[in-house]
Image: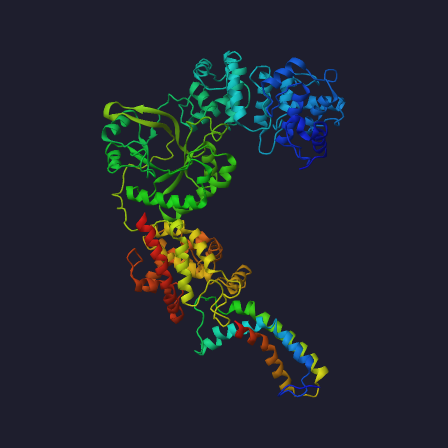
Amino acid sequence: MSTLPGARGYSPTAVVLNLLLGLPGVVPVWLLYQFAVNWPLAALGWTDREPTDNDGILPWLLLPGPVVLGSGALWWLANRAVRRRTAPGGSRAGYWLTSVLLTLVPTLVLIIVL
Amino acid sequence: MADEMVRLAQKFINATYNDGAMLGITKLAEDGRTGWPTMYALTRALQYEMGITALSNSFGPTTLSTLQTKYPKLDGSTVPSANFCRILQSALYCKGYDGGEIDGKYNDRVRAAVTKLKSHMGLDAVFPGDALEPKVVKGLLTMDAYVTVGGGTDGIRAIQRWLNGRYVNRKDFFVIPCDGYHSRDVARSMLLAIQYEIGMADGTANGAFGPGTQAGLKAHPVAVGSTGTWSTLFTAAMILNKRDVPLGDFTAAVRSGVEAFQSFVGLPVTGTGDFRTWASLLVSYGDQTRRGAACDGVTRITPPRAQALKDAGYQYIGRYLSNPSTTSLPEKQIQPGELATIKEYGLRCFPIYQTWSRSAEYFSYPRGTSDAFSAIEWARIHGFKPGTTIYFAVDYDAMDGEVTSVVLPHFRGIHHTISENSFYRVGVYGPRNVCQRVADAGYAQTSFVSDMSSGFSGNLGYPMPSNWAFDQISTITVGSGTGAIEIDNNIASGRDTGQGDFDPGTATVAGLDVDLNKTAHRDAMLRDVQSYLTSIGVPETGGSGWTDSDWATLGGTSTTKAFDMVVSADWLFTSLARDLKLRKALIQTPVLWELRKLNPLDAVADAAVRNGITEDCSTGWGQIFARVAIAARNYCLKEGLINGSPLAEPNLREVWDNLQDPFYNIRSVAYLTVYNAHQLKIARPSLTTGQADTQALLARYNGLGEDAQQYGRELIGLYNVLESYNALSRSAA
């Protein structure tokens, strides 16, 4: 069975799964990014908020919130099932970290391309 | 609604007459719907069967005379052919009667249907039996109804049947509809009936209210105790003018009705059916020898003319606020010093606003709104005091459908603007139907009725509007020498007495914004807007990149679209800027920016308010909070800049809903700029507001703090682009 660096026992199935999930995952990842830029990071002074948006946090909670939470739940359920089947004895932290990084790949590619 | 027997009738025409080719028409649609195409086809088929070679849609004199000559009574024994009978059966089906199949036989069902039809027409006494007389056939081949239809009244239908029954044998009298509606046909038939009763011969009686008819009416006054045909005609005329009296004898109840009518239309209250009353009942202008207390005209009121008018008994003078033409009627507009002359001679003036209101294309909500703003501006320049009623003209014969589709929206714009942006009142000038419908919609307090045009569809068959103030009945010349003046002579009801005193008037303000010259500047202006926005990270579409900090990347509005939306409402930006005496770009800039920056979160916030999750959010074109709009409007109200009732927290949802209307939203943006100056404790925005204050006002539009300052820095550049093109339009005006 092949392995990825830092994730011994990480299966090709998990690689394919997370790369595929990363494609629709562009949307929730982007939403999370927007939220972070406009709220916590802006509060810390690390980023500038978009001054035109002035309806507060409620709209974020109503649409992006459920989208991100729902996407995260599906991602977690899918990965849990794959991990139990393909790497039940592997490193838990390594599996999940690798999965996160793989899921982010399409988004990073898009950022580079755009 | 489709009818199977009508569809069979259409099939019969197509099958028998080579898909219409033998009748000179195209193939009929076999859709089962009765309409003029089917009636025309049946008319042509009848002409064809009678051997007429020049076929026509019209059931004219040739068709009628041929029918009268060849078949004065059509029944089972005289119908010349099966197809001839099928035409009659088809027509019966098209009119909603049982044609007894389309089998070419004048059978029992046809006979029953014909008997019923003639009864509905009121002809059962004059044309007894089940045969079809030529004038009945002519009526059969129209779209007229012979039963009361929705909105019609049985009282009017009784008159229609009575007229048919009594006069159908006169040469120029044809069967009129019996649908319970007063109409042009009914009005003409009433005049024909009077002419017949006067004794006019066929060919002389023409349905016109000429000298012979007037002389005849003068010889036939009716009063309590009158019976017979004249009292029936008089009570019929009363009923057609929506007076609730019994048809027939002139009773005490009729006298009461007459007194009320005479009082309403401004006639001497005699309680009798004298000539003036007859005239007012029969034609919109009534007795044109009457001299009113009001007039209107396109000539300057000089001292000698004012004296002449006063001597002739005139008190109220209608004059025009402006004149869009620089070449014709040079004195149409109120001239300098003229109102002082009117006041000096103890006369009073009511203002009229008219530009090119002579066709349906002119009228719209935007046009009404900008007209109202213009009228307000001119009324203030002339010095008309608050409370003055300004009459807005509908100077053409607007059909009822046009009143619904364009005139009412036009007056909604007028009413909204006059009510909100001035202390004046709205009047309407036009035909009776226009005036009444605008009044019924609540858009005008009083009416100035163009009754001189008695042939207008909007006057024929319509009673005087319930809120009439002036009744324009004739054009006359008053005075002589230097005092001679041609006027439209108007009866006054007293509902509007015009103005007898005037403010000094405001000076015309130089440098006010004008409408954008779109042809000359639109493309270049857009390019400069795009260029500026791109320079600050807002390209034509989306954000500045994947990591842009706003949502405009997803589902946003392009710069071009946002720009075109703003340009589409240029008339309103211009009007508001002129009214508030500030720069148009100050209102345009935040609206354009907010439209360009609309994103899905804005739609989510709107949905949250609609579903009661939250009370308020920034919304509409200008992305304004309802609470902010309320505060801005209340401030402008307090400052006397606008008119209306103060708004409060309970109005929050109502205002939020109103903000969905782009026009209400843009108005609120304009008021907010004024309110923001107050909040910033700087001078009210004007035509000379400097860059620093303008930027501060734009920043305040977005609130307080660094975010708002950033907003102001971004928008001042956009303001400068828009203002530069507005300045070009101003300089060319």
How many numbered dots are placed on residues in this image? 0
Considering depth in this image, is B313 or A43 the residue closer to the camera?
A43
Q: Up-down: is B530 above or below B56?
A: below
* Residue B618 percent coordinates (x, y): 46, 62
Find residue B473 and report its image quarter. Answer: top left
For residue B389, side relative to residue B300 (left or right): right
* Residue B616 percent coordinates (x, y): 48, 62
For residue B45, side relative to residue B478 (left or right): right
* Residue B710 percent coordinates (x, y): 39, 69
Q: Up-down: is B87 above or below B651?
A: above
Considering depth in this image, is B21 or B247 the residue closer to the camera?
B21
| Rendered image coloring scheme | rainbow
* Residue B234 percent coordinates (x, y): 50, 20
For residue A92, side relative to residue B682 (left or right): right
Q: Quadrant of the N terminus of chain B?
A: top right
Considering depth in this image, is A58 or A75 the residue closer to the camera?
A75
Find residue A84 and report its image quarter. Answer: bottom right
Q: Up-down: is B132 above or below B418?
A: above
Q: Is residue B644 visible?
A: no
Considering depth in this image, is B25 or B588 the residue closer to the camera?
B25
Instruction: Name the residue: 33% across, 31% down.
Output: B297
Q: Is residue B57 visible?
A: yes
Find residue B610 and report its image quarter. Answer: bottom right
Q: Up-down: is B699 above or below B641?
A: below
